[in-house]
Amino acid sequence: MKAERLSVAQQNENLKSQRQMLQRMLSVFCGIEVSNPEKPAAVEASASASNRPEIRLFDNQLKLAEVQEKALDAKLRPKLGLYAQGYYGYPGLNMFEDMISRKWSLNGIVGIKLSWNVGALYTHKNDKAKLKAQRELIENAREVFLFNNNMEQIQQTENVSRYRMMMQGDEEIIALRTNVRKAAESKLAHGIIDVNSLLREINNENAAKTQQAIHEIDMLKEMYNLKYTNNE
C-alpha cells in the first residue's frame, strides 16, 4: 500500500511539473501570462460560413472585376463635351474690324467637342477575356473555399457528437466501476480479497474518470475548432 501511495505521489508531481511547463510555453506563445487556466465552457456553433472574412474578400474581388468590366466598356463609347471660352480685350475675334476701329470688345466661343478612342477597339476583346478569366478564377476559389469549409464543419460537428456520446458511455462505465470498487472495499473489510485487488479496482475507476476527462477535452477542442471555422 505504501509503495502504491509513493507511486501515485510521484505521478502527481510529474503531472504538476508538466502543467507548469506547458503554462510557461503557452504564455510565451500567446504573449500573455497564463497562471491559472480554467476549463472553457461548452459552446454551440452554427453551421454557416457567411461570417468568414475570406467570403467578403471573394465578394469584393468579384465586385472589383465587375467595375473594371464596366470601365472597359465605357472606353468604347464616344465622349461628347461642351466647352466655352470668353475674354474682353483688343483685338477681338473680329480682328479686322477691331483693328480699324481700335476698340476693345467682349468676345466668346461656345462649342461641342466629340472624341472617340478608337485604339480601345483593338485591345477590348483581349482585356475582356482577361477579366472573364480573372472572374472565373475568383469564383472557383470561392467555391473551393466553401467546399473545404463545409467539409471541416461536417467533420467537426460529427466529432462533437461522437465525443458527446462517448462521454455518456463514460458515465455508465464510471458508475459501474464505482460500484465494483465499493464492493471490493466491502470484501476487503470482510477479508475476502486482498489489498491488491482493491487497488486494481480503484485504478480501473480512476482510469474511467481520466478517459471521460480526455473525451471532454477533445469535445471542447472540436467545439472551438468549429467556432473558429465559422468565425464566430
Image (tube, rainbow, N blue to C red):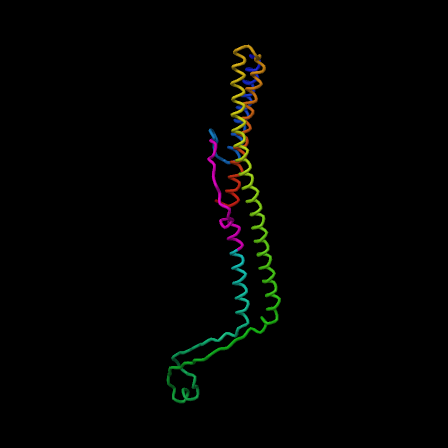
Residue 90: give x, y in percent of width and height.
40, 82
Relative to 32, residue 136 above or below = below
Relative to 80, residue 213 above or below = above
Relative to 137, residue 150 above or below = above
Q: Is residue 87 left or right of residue 130?
A: left
Q: Nearer the viewer, residue 208 or 102?
A: 208
Residue 116: give x, y in percent of width and height.
54, 75
Q: Residue at x 59, y 62 (%)?
A: 132
Residue 103: give x, y in percent of width and height.
37, 85
Magenta stretch, residue numbers = 38-58
Q: Which residue is drawn at 59% across and 55% down?
A: 140
> Is 51 a magenta residue?
yes
Quadrant in the picture for residue 87: bottom left
Looking at the image, how many numbered discs can be counted on the residues?
Answer: 0
Q: In this view, does 182 lie to the left or right of 91?
A: right
In the picture, the quarter occupied by the N terminus is top right
Relative to 92, residue 55 above or below = above
| Chief secondary structure of the magenta portion | loop
> Is 126 a magenta residue?
no
Residue furthest out toward the top: 191
Q: Nearer the viewer, residue 100 or 3?
A: 3
Q: Residue at x 58, y 48 (%)?
A: 148
Residue 77: give x, y in percent of width and height.
53, 73
Q: Which of 53 and 5 is in front in this view?
A: 5
